[in-house]
Image (cartoon, rainbow, N blue to C red):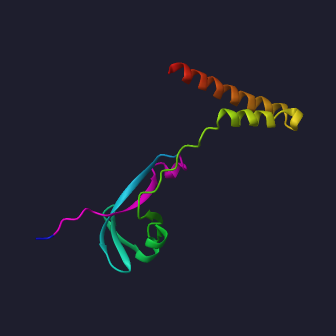
Amino acid sequence: MSEITAPEYLYELWDANWDDGPLGNYQILRHEITKKTPKRIYFVMRGHSGFVDRQRIEADGEILHGYTRRRLHLSPPEIPGQRKSPSLPELKQAMADAHPDRGGTDEGFIAARARYERARDKASRTEGER
């Protein structure tokens, strides 16, 4: 009787909006590994078979698949997150640094102050909802 094993995969970080530029609509695609030899890992990608250099992908954890020009990973890659919003102390420091008395401009200070006040007001509303 043959032993049933769980399927193994190569992973790809894919942006669903790639043709519109990187919009951050990322998904992780799985491509099933069909066979492993000492030199190659064979897989299926959208109904087509392919292979990658086993030694290189095992050494680096990822590889650029030459034919499809896609980066494949041995383990699921991290999905890039949205840019982290600056904290209130960081915004306050940016506002101070943009002050005209410290070499900034009036316009730069006004914009930095507006960002700080929006973040402060948002934080106040969030605290009030708790």
The percent coordinates of residue 113 (x first, y second) are 74, 28
Q: Nearer the viewer, residue 51 or 120?
A: 120
Q: Residue furthest bottom?
A: 38
| Residue positioned 50% across, 21% down in the render | 130
Q: Is residue 39 above or below residue 62?
A: below
Q: Is residue 110 left or right of residue 71?
A: right
The percent coordinates of residue 58 (x first, y second) are 43, 72
The percent coordinates of residue 79 (x first, y second) are 48, 50
Q: Locate the N terminus and report the quarter of the image it occupies.
A: bottom left
Which quadrant holds residue 2? bottom left
| Residue positioned 73% across, 32% down in the render | 92
Q: Nearer the viewer, residue 119 or 53?
A: 119
Q: Nearer the viewer, residue 70 or 101?
A: 101
Which quadrant holds residue 46? bottom left
Q: What is the tally of numbered marks visible in this picture?
A: 0
Q: Residue furthest top?
A: 128
The percent coordinates of residue 86 (x first, y second) are 64, 38
Q: Is residue 95 above or below residue 45?
A: above
Bounds of the magenta segment: 3-23
80 falls in the magenta region: no
Q: Nearer the viewer, residue 113 or 14?
A: 113
14 falls in the magenta region: yes
Q: Is residue 1 left or right of residue 22?
A: left
Q: Residue furthest left?
A: 1
